[in-house]
Image (cartoon, rainbow, N blue to C red):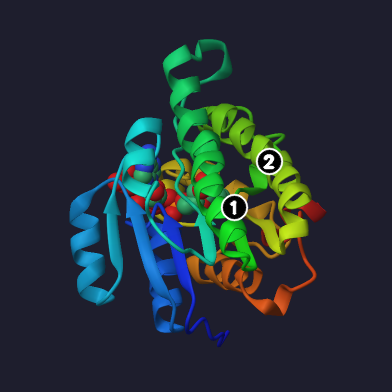
Amino acid sequence: MKLNFKGLRALVTGAGKGIGRDTVKALHASGAKVVAVTRTSADLVSLAKECPGIEPVCVDLGDWEATEKALGGIGPVDLLVNNAAVALVQPFIESTKEVFDRSFKVNVRSVLQVSQIVAKGMISRGVPGSIVNVSSMVAYVTFPGLATYRVLSTHTFTGSTKGAITMLTKAMAMELGPHKIRVNSVNPTVVLTDMGKKVSANPDFSKKLKERHPLRKFAEVEDVVNSILFLLSDSSASTSGSGILVDAGYLAS
Ligand code: NDP
């Protein structure tokens, strides 16, 4: 998809690896100035070599004070991609406070915090904007019938945090809409990034899960990035509070 973001400044969280990294590259190639936010500085060094001119910010988005310090004065942003997340594995019955808190701090609270910073800037400048929250198919569904696989426990937290993102996306869309700021989500099935490989590490589970998708496949990083770019762009000018499933048909089954 060829979209032009020339003259716009974008901020992408979780920019070091996987979907976030390829989103930065696509936005950079489409003419946007990009602020790349992630936790591992080596990833930012290599990304800056691939995409000269990006603005790297190294911060743990699970830390409210550090995030405020790193991004509080970030300046004008027109496009925001809230992509950073963790997938921490613990069965529900053994879940700990620490893992619950970490999951919600990174996957939900940071979306609120970074979006607040960015949206306040958009409102005070009186400019339109677009925010995309990278959610997941597990915002809507578990993996029924595959319960014998321990990997299911991954979704205790991932699914709960992504379910929260569904309503946060709608609430933000309601409140920010009058300011011409659109807010949407993308909801992928498994994508074979570092995170996706962990989730589908059991080959038997992975094969069975793939077969449950009508298209008999998982999603590619590029498929997710294309949907993110579409929602960021004016091509989706009348879409807000919504989500694009990139799920190879899983939810139709
Ligand atoms: P990866 O684990 O491959 O990459 C995640 C990126 O986010 C890394 O660069 C990571 O940095 C960064 N990140 C994680 N935690 C923090 C933090 N606290 N502060 C700053 N940066 C952080 O994940 P994916 O690319 O696969 O996932 C991207 C998004 O897509 C997530 O929201 C995920 O939930 C969603 N998704 C992924 C699916 C999949 O199967 N892969 C399926 C459905 C949705 P570092 O490595 O340094 O920690």
Is label 2 in contact with label 1 (beta carbons under 8 Å)?
yes
From where the camera sits, is residue 206 visible? no
For residue 46, the mark is none
Dot 1 alpha-carbon crowd within 10 angstroms: few under 14, some 14 to 19, many 20 or more: many
Residue to which mark 2 is pinned: 168
Q: Of helix, strand and loop, which one carries label 1?
A: strand
User: Which sits earlier in the primary sequence, circle 2 or circle 1?
Assistant: 1
Question: Viewer-proximal residue, 188 or 34?
Answer: 34
Q: Position of residue 63 (x, y in %)?
A: 37, 32
Based on the displayed image, in which of its 4 quarters is residue 140 positioned?
A: top right
Query: Which residue is under mark 1?
Result: 133
Type of the residue with mark 2: Leu
Q: Residue at x 20, y 51 (%)?
A: 41
Q: Secondary structure at mark 2?
A: helix
Q: State the CA–CA distance, disc 2 to disc 1.
A: 9 Å
Q: Is residue 124 left or right of residue 64?
A: right
Residue 244 in picture, x, y percent from top left = 71, 61
Question: Residue 245 vs residue 82: left or right?
Answer: right
Q: Image height check: is 205 above or below 185?
A: above
